[in-house]
Image (cartoon, rainbow, N blue to C red):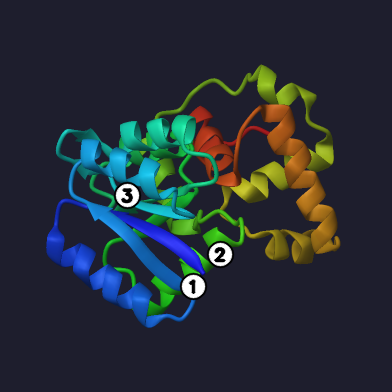
Amino acid sequence: MTTVFLVDDHALLRAGIRTTLEDASDFTVVGEAGDVPSALRGIEHHTPDIALVDVRLPGGNGVELIREVRSRVVGTRCVILTSFADHHALYQSAMAGAQGFLLKDVPKAQLVESLRRVAAGESLISSETVQVLEAQTPYLPPEDELLGDLTPREREILGLIAEGRTNREIAEQLFLAEKTVRNYVSNILSKLGMRNRTQVAAYIVQRSSKRPW
């Protein structure tokens, strides 16, 4: 059973998500909050598998909350709820350690399936998210010491991660086993000192819209 904590200042939205998740047989909502201080206390108390977090919150914001959760609570994966109203916040959320992003008007079935993927250890970074980030980030010089340690194959896979491709899609495109791609992704994360592929994608998009790798 996957446990979820809901963080949003709109009670009706929380109620709708709670109903959707509890209608599924493999989720239980262990708590909810409408502001940052209450959310942090609740997440620390319940240590849920997933915290579903709005960007804009009373008493702080979702980015700050994710940073605190990542530093205080072991094992809780954070997913941002967004309407794409604040593109800078998307990037900051990814760099803070968010496991991915979901639109507030996401269909119920997609919400459930997406959180199942997060519970299984996957990140949620779609091509639409990348396009939004890319459109809102300025061009920066391509030189980057972090990328210098990557092999040509790792750089190729890095580019596909930044496009929002899943491990399966990368494996199919490069004619590799999915397990091999997972190993490459693990090596890339280790070399870049990052936690998940969402963070990697956001970093690359922020570095340069021309993606010079």
Amino acid on which disc 3 is placed: Val
Label 1 Cα neighbours within 10 Å, binned few <14 / some 14-19 / many ≥20: few
Q: Amino acid at mark 1?
A: Glu
- Asked if residue 60 lies left or right of residue 205, the reply is left
Pointer 3: what residue? 53
| Res. 41 visible in picture | yes
Label 2, secondary structure: give it: helix
Q: What residue sits 81% from the left and 48% below the top?
A: 183
Marks 3 and 2 in Cβ contact (< 8 Å): no
Question: In the drawing, does residue 75 fall left or right of residue 137?
Answer: right
Q: Which residue is located at x 23 percent, y 38 percent? A: 36
Q: Is residue 163 above or below residue 133?
A: below
Percent x, y for residue 98? 46, 43
Give the distance between the C-alpha atoms of the residues marked 1 and 3, in whole angstroms: 17 Å
* 59 and 159: which is toward the camera: 59
Q: Tell me how many marks there are.
A: 3
Looking at the image, tell me whether mark 3 or mark 2 is earlier in sequence order: 3
Helix, strand or loop at label 3? It is: strand
- Label 2: few (<14), some or many (≥20) within 10 Å? few
* First of labels 1, 3 by sequence position: 3
**Residue identified by numbered label 1:** 113
Q: Is residue 107 visible?
A: no
Q: Are marks 1 and 2 in contact (CB under 8 Å)?
A: yes
Tell me the tag on residue 138.
none
> Dot 3, how many residues are within 10 Å of its Cα: few (below 14), some (14-19), or many (20+)?
many
> Which residue type does callout 2 highlight?
Arg
Q: Residue at x 61, y 32 (%)?
A: 194
Front residue (pair 154, 63): 63
Position of residue 180 in the picture relative to residue 166 (left or right)? right
User: The C terminus lies in which quarter of the figure?
Assistant: top right
Can you name the residue that lies furthest to the front here? 45
Find disc 2 in the rendering and name its residue: 117
